[in-house]
Image: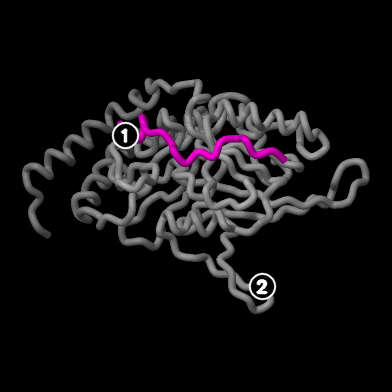
Amino acid sequence: MSEIGRRQFLKIGGALAGAAIVPRAAAAQEWASDYDDAYAVLYDATRCIGCRSCARACRAANDLKPDRGEINGVGFDMPHELSHQNLMALQLYRDENPPHDEKPRWSYIKRNCMHCNLPACASACPVAALKKTDGGPVVYFEDRCIGCRYCMLACPYNVPKYEWLDRSPRVRKCNLNGACVRACPVAALVDGNRGDLIRDAHQRIDRHPARYVSHVYGEYEGGGTSYLILSAIPLEKMGFPALPATASGHYAEPILRTVPGWVAGLALFLGALHQLRRGERPAAGTGEGAVVRPEGNQSEAAINTSTHSSATGVENKP
């Protein structure tokens, strides 16, 4: 084993010293409470036709391998569940117990990171590898990640996935780059400012009360999200949690309270050593922790201040 140089030793020592202040820093972190001017996406499940154009665009934007499936001998890219290769999944739900003796109803539902305003994953992370940006997305910084996977335990939506078989594993999730929105041929996905999208969603409900559940999922759940959903079937029936209108970050507190300080220190030491041993990952696209742009990777400050020129607005009416 080669000797660890002085600079490397200082890096590891700094990580160990940081372990002593991680819980205090995490507890003291201030979260913005109003993201109405931030970028968001509205998914209208009543418009979705299940074409999976969004899934193909997501794969292309994030350089992901297809998730092959087969129907009647014909192969399809069919991401049914979230995974390290499926940053979004389009599922088909059939309501077998409709109200008022109505016929069974069905609905497509698009699952991906909800980009919570107060994300539990970021609250649980001891090294700030996940962060809610002022621009809207919850982004992941793989160079900070130590592989503890507390984010996976904390997320109430079961979104973050891990590259278990990769030599240099990462946590993977949607980065809200808007590729799926631009690919949708029926405007089931629209993007824009969160406040505008919420107002548009309520207008749709008012115009067509029989078409929608009278609720915009993500407006208040867990402190609100930047991925909003309209549906004809209650989202709780389709497996989404019925969260109170409070910060979801408090779900991470029991995890952090049960972690002894020496465990955090050991995790940081091993994580730092792993980063030093594995070296730099070859550049591929824009990575996980940035909004996709032609110019490639952006700094954290650039992510916070960037605007989404791809917004389609909310002019499309049912």
Q: Is residue 304 left or right of residue 199?
A: left
Magenta range is: 301-318
Tell me the residue that label 1 is attached to: 302
In reply to whether residue 248 is colored magenta, the answer given is no
Q: Which mark is residue 71?
A: 2
Q: Is residue 132 above or below residue 280?
A: above
Crowding at dot 2, Cα within 10 Å, few <14 / some 14-19 / many 20+, comes out as few
Q: CA distance from mark 1 to mark 2?
A: 44 Å
Q: Amino acid at mark 2?
A: Ile
Q: Residue furthest bottom?
A: 73
Of labels 1 and 2, earlier in sequence is: 2
Which percent across, then down, holds residue 229?
A: 64, 39
Which percent across, then down, holds residue 20?
A: 27, 29
Q: Is residue 154 above or below residue 198?
A: below
Under circle 1, the secondary element is helix
The residue under the point 69% across, 55% down is 92
Which percent across, then down, holds residue 172?
A: 43, 50
Among the 4 quarters of the image, the one containing residue 306: top left
Q: Is residue 210 left or right of residue 302?
A: right
The residue under the point 66% across, 57% down is 50
Q: Amino acid at mark 1?
A: Ala
Q: Is residue 15 left or right of residue 194?
A: left
Q: Is residue 59 above or below residue 315?
A: below
Crowding at dot 1, Cα within 10 Å, few <14 / some 14-19 / many 20+, comes out as few
In reply to whether residue 313 is colored magenta, the answer given is yes
The residue under the point 32% across, 46% down is 142
